[in-house]
Amino acid sequence: MQPLAIRMRPKTIDDIIGQQHILNKDSLLYKMIKNDTLSSILLYGPPGTGKTTIAQVIANTTNAEFEKLNAVAAGKKDIESVCKRAQKNLETNIKTILFIDEIHRFNKAQQDYLLPFVEDGTVTLIGATTENPFFEVNPALVSRSILFELKPVQSDDIRRLIKKALIDSENGLGDKHFTIDEDAAVLLSEQANGDIRHALSMLELAALKID
């Protein structure tokens, strides 16, 4: 079974908890996702704040082909393969969205190779990074992307998600009839330090110990 944090990952943009400064209904990012008109973007912020979740929501809702690479494991050949498929897609007017997790881990040569495909629209880039892109990402890629900074998730938002996980029988812990009192939920949400994934991992661990 997948970890609780994966099972509870939102399927739609309206299900995402937190990050309202970039995901409120009047925001540019919200409108691009809702209208399936995404342009290249860079998402940066601390771990567990929703970068991969936003990318997955886009994958769930877009009509474009969605490709995913992790910069830690992917090499130049992987980028080449994706870009070739994207060029083929263009022949039938199908867009390709390329999500690169930890894009700062790509070296200069890899980023330089990708650049022209982003420039000419062969791929629409979603780059995710925990680092400041102005220092860690090719300046030309930065200039061709819209930057969105994700912030640590508020403890009140995390507490709401904890409560949701406790009653969700399909993806959460509802089938285990596991409960925690309000003080424990507050403490857990505060100790997560704005990291949703960490909060849900701690909750799942607590449930396993009691089970």
Image: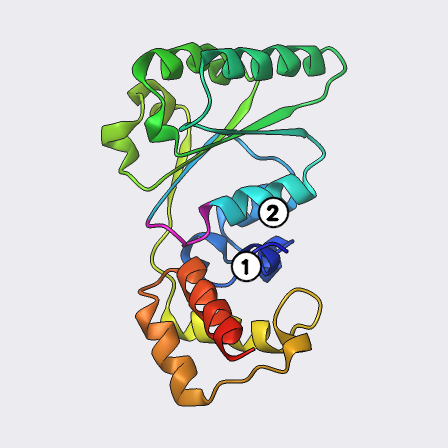
Q: Nearer the viewer, residue 174 or 48?
A: 174
Q: Residues within 10 Å of mark 2 (few under 14, many from 20)?
A: some
Tell me the magenta residue range: 46-51
Cα distance between the residues tagged 2 and 1: 9 Å
Q: Residues within 10 Å of mark 1 (few under 14, many from 20)?
A: some
Amino acid at the residue labelled 2? Val
Residue at point 39%, 34% (across, down): 102
Identify the residue under disc 1: 16
Mark carried by residue 57: 2
Q: Nearer the viewer, residue 154 or 107?
A: 107
Quadrant where the N terminus sits is bottom right
Q: Is residue 158 left or right of residue 5?
A: left
Residue 12, given in percent of the width and then of the height, sits at: 64, 54
Residue at point 64%, 77% (across, down): 176
- Taking the magenta stretch, the answer to whether it contains residue 88 is no
Q: Check whether the beta carbons of the residues at disc 2 and disc 1 lie within 8 A of each other.
A: yes
Amino acid at the residue labelled 1? Ile
Q: Secondary structure at mark 2?
A: helix
Q: Relative to residue 41, is residue 171 depicted above or below? A: below
Q: Secondary structure at mark 1?
A: loop
Residue 9, given in percent of the width and then of the height, sits at: 57, 56
- Precedes in sequence: disc 2 or disc 1: 1
Q: Nearer the viewer, residue 193 or 121?
A: 193
Residue 210, given in percent of the width and then of the height, sits at: 51, 80
Residue at point 72%, 34% (across, down): 63
Quadrant where the C terminus sits is bottom right
Q: Relative to residue 205, is residue 100 depicted above or below? A: above
